[in-house]
Image (cartoon, rainbow, N blue to C red):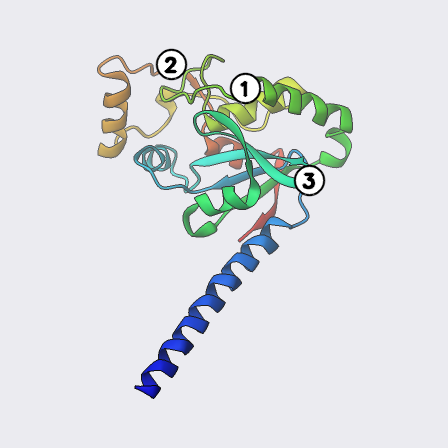
Amino acid sequence: MKKYKISLLLLIIISAGWFVYGKIATNQLANHEYKEGDIVFQTTNSDQCKAVQLATHSPYSHCGILFKENKAWHVLEAVGPVKVTPLDEWIEHGVDHKYVVKRLKNAEQVLTTDILKKMRREGEKFIGQDYDFTFEWSDQKIYCSELVWKIYKRGGELEVGKLSRLKDFDLSHPIVKTMLNERYGQQIPLEEIVIPPSSIFESEALITVFKN
């Protein structure tokens, strides 16, 4: 019995240690040398995210923009509704807490204090906006990569990622077909302008500054 109690105590100590280590590791990543305007990408778990990954042939299904609030890093993201999420919390929502941070190549020169203020103001206009499940190119509702693209375009006259049409993606997988059918029925808007996370991720205007 004594040996059992000792083993149980060791197990509790080890488990607690791993939990603390995990939280410390996450916090260390969250305190990396970021800059306002950095774009963060992650893989998330949902039927829609899986369909987006299959249609774009990319693992990244969600993105947002980093800004500082009260000296702490937050992510402005469109998840329904558009909101500001603490970075540590945002990281935990991703699969295995994996994420990538990208930055404009000439950010030091281009993302001036004034431009960043304009970008922030553009983003704040969308806060509380409903998520756009039909990926329309209007401002009535908005999805994650659309939010990022429009903030850069309207706040800084910068294009991060190439706009495409829905028809440009791989719509052949059964999971993708199911999602399209659920959202549009037989009237799929193949000519609709879209900007998936993958297009921003692959933009030649960006460089990778962090990946775990």
Residue at 27% over, 23% down: 180
Q: Secondary structure at mark 2?
A: loop
Residue type, mark 2 in image: Glu
Residue 140 visible from this viewpoint: yes
Residue that mark 3 sits on: 35
Q: CA distance from mark 2 to mark 1?
A: 25 Å
Q: Are marks 1 and 3 in contact (CB under 8 Å)?
A: no
- Where residue 178 appears, as percent x and y from the top left, is 23, 28
Q: CA distance from mark 2 to mark 3?
A: 36 Å
- Where residue 75 appears, as percent x and y from the top left, is 57, 35
Q: CA distance from mark 1 to mark 3?
A: 21 Å
Q: Return the disc, 2 or 1, that comes first in the chain's sequence.
A: 1
- Where residue 177 appears, as percent x and y from the top left, is 24, 27
Residue that mark 1 sits on: 126
183, 199: nearer the viewer: 183
Q: Quadrant of residue 194?
A: top left
Q: Return the disc, 1 or 3, that comes first in the chain's sequence.
A: 3
Q: Return the disc, 2 or 3, that comes first in the chain's sequence.
A: 3
Q: Quadrant of the N terminus?
A: bottom left
Residue 203 visible from this viewpoint: no
Residue type, mark 3 in image: Lys
Q: Secondary structure at mark 1?
A: helix
**Label placed on residue 191:** 2
10 Å crowding of disc 3: few (<14), some (14-19), many (20+): some
Q: Quadrant of residue 79?
A: top left
- Where residue 86 appears, as percent x and y from the top left, is 56, 40
Q: Are marks 2 and 1 in contact (CB under 8 Å)?
A: no
